[in-house]
Amino acid sequence: MAIADVSQNSVAELISLAGRRAVVTGGAQGLGKAMVRRLAEAGASVLIGDLNLDQAEAAAHEISTRYGVDVIATTLNVSDSGSIMAAADLAVQNLGGLDIWVNNAGLYPNIPLLDMTDAVWNDVMEVNLRGVFVSCREAARRMIDAGTSGVIVNVVSTAGFKGVAPGVSAYVASKHGVRGLNKQLAIELAPHSIRVLGVAPTFCETEGNTAALAKLPDRVRAEISATLTSMLGRVGVPDDIARAVLFCASDMSLFMTGSTLLVDAGETA
């Protein structure tokens, strides 16, 4: 299948997700919830998958009520292949299909190299890399089985382009891996008209990031905080990233695949 030529479509038609079905992992709060909100505003029905079902259900009710589209929630553990498969099946059964999958869930432990255990390293890879791989595989399977085109959006990080602060070797390695996975899966899925794109945020003010910073040693927190500026004059907020995800998920980006878009206020310039 060839990707459609949408040159004659209006901007409103290009950005619209009316009739499309999406999954967002880690969508109960922070970046993920902002992504769900923008996808729903554009007309998509959305399944929120998250470890915290109560929070996911609250987000689903809030967003569904606000935008008048179906938003449902389920427990999702992206380190468990069976949980991912169940979420994909639920989206197909309850939303009627699957057109968009956003891999947002992730871990960000801060542990110096000499203190990092094999178990911690493996946990990060299970969630941040293998979980993304399995989610991509299961999303693609359902799109292909249904004979539909689609798009998979993987949240990378500026850490997928460079090293960052001390103590995040596992995180940096996992995000470089996801960026590489985007390139490879774009090749494999292009014949099925399934696009694979990445969005790489800089640090944003979220509940999770604020809590993570608070747990760090004073010296490390000070080092990281000193870098939290941007040439655009402010720190990022979740909607800055959500708008980029909406662009990737919509027909505005229809001739793009394999790319990872930096949303970093020039951090990696």
Image (cartoon, rainbow, N blue to C red):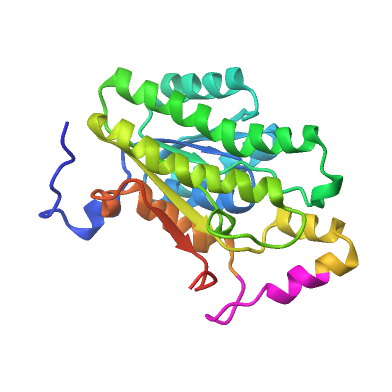
Residue 166: image quadrant is bottom right
Q: Which quarter shows the N terminus?
A: top left
Q: Residue at x 74, y 68 (%)?
A: 224
Q: Residue at x 33, y 45 (%)?
A: 17
Magenta residues span 222-235
- Left or right placement of residue 44 versus residue 223 in this view: left
Residue 220 visible somewhere in the drawing: yes
Residue 69 visible somewhere in the drawing: no
Residue 155 part of the magenta-drawn span: no
- Left or right placement of residue 230 versus residue 111 in this view: left
> For this rendering, which residue is in front, 181 or 225?
181
In the image, residue 203 above or below residue 13: below
Q: Residue at x 38, y 29 (%)?
A: 98
Q: Residue 50, image x and y in percent?
A: 64, 35
In the image, residue 245 above or below residue 103: below
Q: Residue 88, image x and y in percent?
A: 48, 24
Residue 230 part of the magenta-drawn span: yes
Q: Residue 196, image x and y in percent?
A: 37, 41
In the image, residue 255 above or below residue 100: below
Q: Residue 70, image x and y in percent?
A: 45, 35
Q: Residue at x 84, y 60 (%)?
A: 214
